[in-house]
Image (cartoon, rainbow, N blue to C red):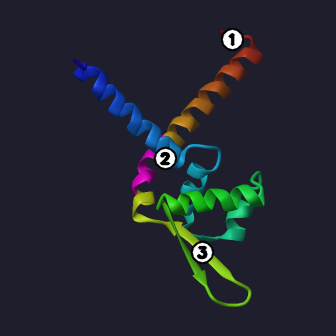
Amino acid sequence: MKNKSNSSETTQLCAVDYAFKRIGGKYKARILWYLNMKTVLRYGELSRTLPDITTKMLTQTLRELEDDKLITRKMYHEVPPKVEYSLSETGLELIPFIKHLHNWGKKQIGKEALAACQADCGID
């Protein structure tokens, strides 16, 4: 007989795994965050916003986000080709959580900076 507690934990872990597969990694959450800040970004703008990403990785990450329906890609048939990226409705649902992570990160950076300053000054 299965333990209901274990079944519930397994479901929760699977949901967490599902979520992190969609937004995990070095760039996905950052791309979603920047698209939220600017509403619409072109490929070149995204590339400049994330200077540490390679062209191949940016293209792959954008495709994954589009496949997961977190962003929308709008292509204009003109010369030179113009492509714009924006958050989908599903992607917009993630922004409060990313904002919470952003605020948590700022808080932790502040704590670490304070601790480093205190260590430099010999304060316990």
Q: CA distance from mark 1 to mark 3?
A: 51 Å
- For label 1, the crowd category at 10 Å Cα-Cα, with few meaning under 14, some 14 to 19 and many 20 or more, is few
Mark 1: amino acid: Ile
Image marks 3 and 2: residues in contact by CB distance under 8 Å: no
For the N terminus, the image quarter is: top left
Q: CA distance from mark 1 to mark 2?
A: 34 Å
**Which callout, 1 or 3, points to the residue nearer the camera?**
3
Q: Which mark is residue 123?
A: 1
From the viewer's perspective, is 55 left or right of 34? right
Q: Is residue 95 magenta?
A: yes
The stretch in magenta equals 93-100
**Which callout, 3 or 2, points to the residue nearer the camera?**
3
Q: Position of residue 28 (x, y in %)?
A: 59, 51
* Mark 3 lies on residue: 84
- For label 3, the crowd category at 10 Å Cα-Cα, with few meaning under 14, some 14 to 19 and many 20 or more, is some
Q: Which mark is residue 98?
A: 2
